[in-house]
Amino acid sequence: MTENYTINIAKEVAVCTSPKTGMRKKKINQGILIENLGIKDDAHANSETHRQVSFLAMESIKKMQDMGLDVHEGDFAENITTSGIDLLALPIGSKITIGEETLLEISQHGKICHTPCAIYHQAGTCVMPKEGIFAKVLKGGNKSKPATE
C-alpha cells in the first residue's frame, strides 16, 4: 500500500514551463495542472506519458551552484522546484497533493539522459537524472502558485 503525502505550498519555490522540449524552463506566476496531461502550455504536457510533471529540489540546484555554476529554478527543465522535501523518499505510486485540488502520483525517480545537456558539459554532471522525480496528474487544478518571498 502506498502512502499519500501533502506538499505544502510554502515548500514550492518555482513553477516553470517551456514551449519546446530540450530547453531550460522559465518561471511562471501560476501553473495550471490539467488532469492526465501536465502543466498547461508546457512542452512536456502529454497524456501518453507517465512523466507529465517533473520535480527537482532547490537543494539539488544548490549543489550545482556550489560547483560554481550559474543555474537557477527551471534550468534543469523541471516544472516544479521544491525546498525542504526529500523527493526521492517519496515512493513510486505515492499520491501527493498540491493545494486543495491538485492530486499527482509519483511515477518515476530519475531519468536517463540520452543526450548530455549543456549543464553536463559544463560541470561533468547533472542532478536531474539522479535527483529529479516525475508524476502523472490525477486531478488538475490551479493551485501550483509558488509562495511569495
Image (cartoon, rainbow, N blue to C red):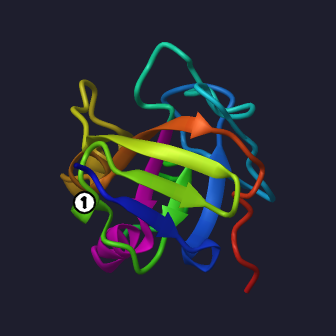
Magenta region:
53-68
Please say if 36 is above or below 123: above
Residue at (54, 76) in percent of width and height: 11
For this rendering, which residue is in front, 7 or 51? 7
Badge 1 is on which residue? 88
Task: Specify the farthest residue to the bottom.
Answer: 149
For this rendering, which residue is in front, 116 or 81? 81
Task: Specify the farthest residue to the top.
Answer: 48
For this rendering, which residue is in front, 123 or 15? 15
Q: Amino acid at mark 1?
A: Leu
Quadrant the C terminus occupies: bottom right
Please say if 126 is above or below 147: above
Residue at (42, 31) in percent of width and height: 51
**Which image quadrant for residue 135?**
top left
Query: Residue 9 location in percent, x, y?
Result: 63, 72
Q: Is residue 11 left or right of residue 62?
A: right
Residue 76 visible to an observer of this rendering:
no
Q: Is residue 14 left or right of residue 85?
A: right
Residue at (40, 26) in percent of width and height: 50
- Let me know if residue 135 is in the magenta part: no
For this rendering, which residue is in front, 56 or 91? 91
Query: Residue 62 location in percent, x, y?
Result: 37, 76
